[in-house]
Amino acid sequence: MQRMLDVSDDVRAEIGDEEADRLLTGDNSPGSYDCTSCRTPGDSQQERTSTVLFVGEETAVLAFAHATCLPSQVVQVPEEQLQGAVQSITGGEAPAQEQAEQPEQAVLGVTSGLVLLEGDLHPALVVEPTGPIARPGATGGGDDFLPLLIEQGFMPVSQVKEVPSALGGWSVLLAMGQLHAVLMPGESGGQVAWWQAHQPLHVTEGWRAAANKTNQVLVFAAPVGSIGRQPREDLLRDALDKAAANGQLVTAAMPLAGT
């Protein structure tokens, strides 16, 4: 039976015309599926469905998503991250918090939570390094984490009360219902990972529901020692408010898996 599949030109170029045609005619695609973004059921016979191809150095994974959640696209991801995605499909567990390395060897801690702004709950990521972030090439030490992010378009805030404006070229990659990366514009075009999970980062059903409702994620960032690892969302919000009042918080809104 003909499927209501969207296969982008980029995906077709990667998998070939023959495989793409098999998908479109239903020979090699599921009728029902779990959306790779929101993790709720979908049916390619009843609703528009996107093919999303995750490509690593050696591995490629073809996934399906509601067309209202994600467009059909090719997402380049590091091989380690893609292997983690494969593990998540087969039931691998992920920690509630995850760390990853930047090129400067600075380690970022990322925490997910819901933040109440303007009467609505918004999905948020809070990013805090475990040590000072020096400007590339700097030799005098110091912490340039916030100035570097402000140069990228993040906005400093003195109060956590308004939804920030969207940051162009950045996006949050949520695949198979788990968080995989925060992507930033690459120097030669496309996107590269600013932060990536060593293993897919678990987010709650409430977080995913809020993200699917708004189709964007709020990202807050603060220097080392400003937030800490808070065990509850109310304590996380208190820490964000204190960091903002102390001039130690920047923020931006990013689309989900934006291209």
Image (cartoon, rainbow, N blue to C red):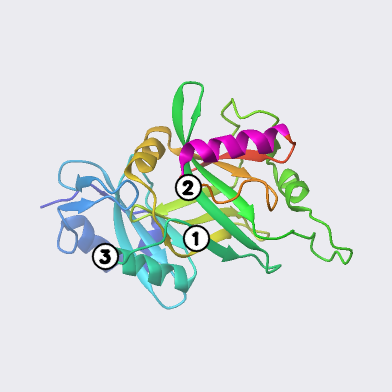
Query: Do residues under tags 2 and 1 come within 8 Å of each other at their CB atoms?
Result: no
Helix, strand or loop status at disc 1:
strand
Residue 147 x %, y %: 78, 47
User: In the rendered image, which residue does mark 3 sit on?
Assistant: 91
Mark 3 Cα shell of 10 Å, populated few (<14), some (14-19), many (≥20): few
Chain-order first, disc 3 or disc 2: 3
**Residue 77, placed above or below residue 71:** below
Q: Residue lying furthest top in this view?
A: 119
Query: Do residues under tags 3 and 1 come within 8 Å of each other at their CB atoms?
Result: no
Nearer the observer: mark 3 or 1; the answer is 1
Circle 2: residue type: Pro
For this rendering, which residue is in front, 74 or 35?
Answer: 35
Chain-order first, disc 2 or disc 1: 1
Circle 3: residue type: Gly
Circle 1: residue type: Glu
> How far, Cα to Cα, is label 2 from label 1?
14 Å
**Bounds of the magenta span?**
231-245
> How far, Cα to Cα, is label 3 from label 2?
25 Å
Helix, strand or loop status at disc 2:
loop
Q: Quadrant of residue 160?
A: top right
User: In the rendered image, which residue does mark 1 sit on?
Assistant: 98
Residue 89 x %, y %: 28, 64
